Image (cartoon, rainbow, N blue to C red):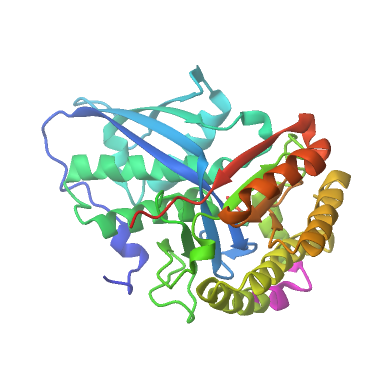
């Protein structure tokens, strides 16, 4: 494997493009992911300011179908030709976003100008659930684009190379999407760190270190506290880190939390796991609260749920914990062996604080032996 990869390795000439007319359909399905070590703060072209680590989900995913046909002679090859459908309807807003993304890729992936593209995308989870879909949707799209490249240019024959490129392209669409291209890999990391060999800022990689049995098929129940659009976009949130007085402390903390988490994952140490995971969630929200301008992304229900989880953990001695993304919803994490009692607890005690009583049960992909 070549990890001295640079941006140049992902650029593609069109000289490989054959003259023959081609058309076809490509489909990919990509899962959502939840970061335990958070990516918050970036530089350059979508490069993370610290390494991140995430759990891959199973039930929350985006499925994307890409139909392509090569352009005829005389048609402009320097423009993106795109139609975008979301959940069976033409969607102008999303089409514009995807068009902008594809246009940003054109200088380095000029083959994209040689085809008419129709993209159909749908999520397994309701659009109004307040669940970020940029990770799963950008990942599914990036996988489709890599298959398109494979088809048109006969490149990316090697599986590892294929996924690295997909993760690279997904990252350019949305940072966290870099970690969503690996459907059947339970844990993914993105961002260079000495602690894990062969990591890169350019793309995410499957987690290669030992994982204790207790963390295999870990459960994540996503409590929908608010279905509203976030008051600050991720893009704006990341930008606020540039002037955050605690930024450097945060980046150092991400490295040390990652080190602790790696050991906990290996040893099956749920206590340290909980300490690190909840700390990462609190720090993410604390950073937003002390940004200029400040943002409070938790709702009253978020805090009530967090307190209830911590109390239940103490009383029952069950290693249940939470994490948050940049919003009000709560991801409740627990080992498979405590599934029954945790789901009863969620149903009886946490559901009343969910928007319309909504929550989504999810889990890590099961590793086939
Ligand atoms: C809090 O990946 O949504 O979920 O790169 O601007 O698209 P962009 O940001 P995005 O940021 C995710 C932030 C996070 C933490 C994480 O997933 O690591």
| Magenta-span inclusion, residue 248 | yes
Quadrant of residue 148 within the rendered picture: top left
Left or right of residue 42, residue 281 in this image = right
Residue 55 to residue 144: above or below: below
Magenta stretch in the rendered image: 243-251
Q: For ligand 1, which image quadrant applies?
A: bottom right
Residue 260 in the image: state x and y as whole percent.
Answer: 60, 78
Residue plotted at (35% across, 54% down): 368
- The picture places residue 240, in percent across and down from the top left corner, at 73, 60
Which residue is at 61% across, 41% downward?
361
Q: Is residue 241 left or right of residue 51?
A: right
Residue toward you, 120 or 274: 274
Near-viewer residue (261 or 218): 218
Quarter of the image that includes the N terminus: bottom left
Q: Main secondary structure of the magenta part?
A: helix
* 20 and 364: which is toward the camera: 364
Residue 40, position as x, y percentages in the image = 65, 62
**Residue 26 can be seen in this image:** yes
Would you identify the image quadrant in which residue 244 lies? Answer: bottom right
Residue 253 in which image quadrant: bottom right
Please give left or right for residue 263 compared with residue 142 in the image.
Answer: right
């Amino acid at each position: 494997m070549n990890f001295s990869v640079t941006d140049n390795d992902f650029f593609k000439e069109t000289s490989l493009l054959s003259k023959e007319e081609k058309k076809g359909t490509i489909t990919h399905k990509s899962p959502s992911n939840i970061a335990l070590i958070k990516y918050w703060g970036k530089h350059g072209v979508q490069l993370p300011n610290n390494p991140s680590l995430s759990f891959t989900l199973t039930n929350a995913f985006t499925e994307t179908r890409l139909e392509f046909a090569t352009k005829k002679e005389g048609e402009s090859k320097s423009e993106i030709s795109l139609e975008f459908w979301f959940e069976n309807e033409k969607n102008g807003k999303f089409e514009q976003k995807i068009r902008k993304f594809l246009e940003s890729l054109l200088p380095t992936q000029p083959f994209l100008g040689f085809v008419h593209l129709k993209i159909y995308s749908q999520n397994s989870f309701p659009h109004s659930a307040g669940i970020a879909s940029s990770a799963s949707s950008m990942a599914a799209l990036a996988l489709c684009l890599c298959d398109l490249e494979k088809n048109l240019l006969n490149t990316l024959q090697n599986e590892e190379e294929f996924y690295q490129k997909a993760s690279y392209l997904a990252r350019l669409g949305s940072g966290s999407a870099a970690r969503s291209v690996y459907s059947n890999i339970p844990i993914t990391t993105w961002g260079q760190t000495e602690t894990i060999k062969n990591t890169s800022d350019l793309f995410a990689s499957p987690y290669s270190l030992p994982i204790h049995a207790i963390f295999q098929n870990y459960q994540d129940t996503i409590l929908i506290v608010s279905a509203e659009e976030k008051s600050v976009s991720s893009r704006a949130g990341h930008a606020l880190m540039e002037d955050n007085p605690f930024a450097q402390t945060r980046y150092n903390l991400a490295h040390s939390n990652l080190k602790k988490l790696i050991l906990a994952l290996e040893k099956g140490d749920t206590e340290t796991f909980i300490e690190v995971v909840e700390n990462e969630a609190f720090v993410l929200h604390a950073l937003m609260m002390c940004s200029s301008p400040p943002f409070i992304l938790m709702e009253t229900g978020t805090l009530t749920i967090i307190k209830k989880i911590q109390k239940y953990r103490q009383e029952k001695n069950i290693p249940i914990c939470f994490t948050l993304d940049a919003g009000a919803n709560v991801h409740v994490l627990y080992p498979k062996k405590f599934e029954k009692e945790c789901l009863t607890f969620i149903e009886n005690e946490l559901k009343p604080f969910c928007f319309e009583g909504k929550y989504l049960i999810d889990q890590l992909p099961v590793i086939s032996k």
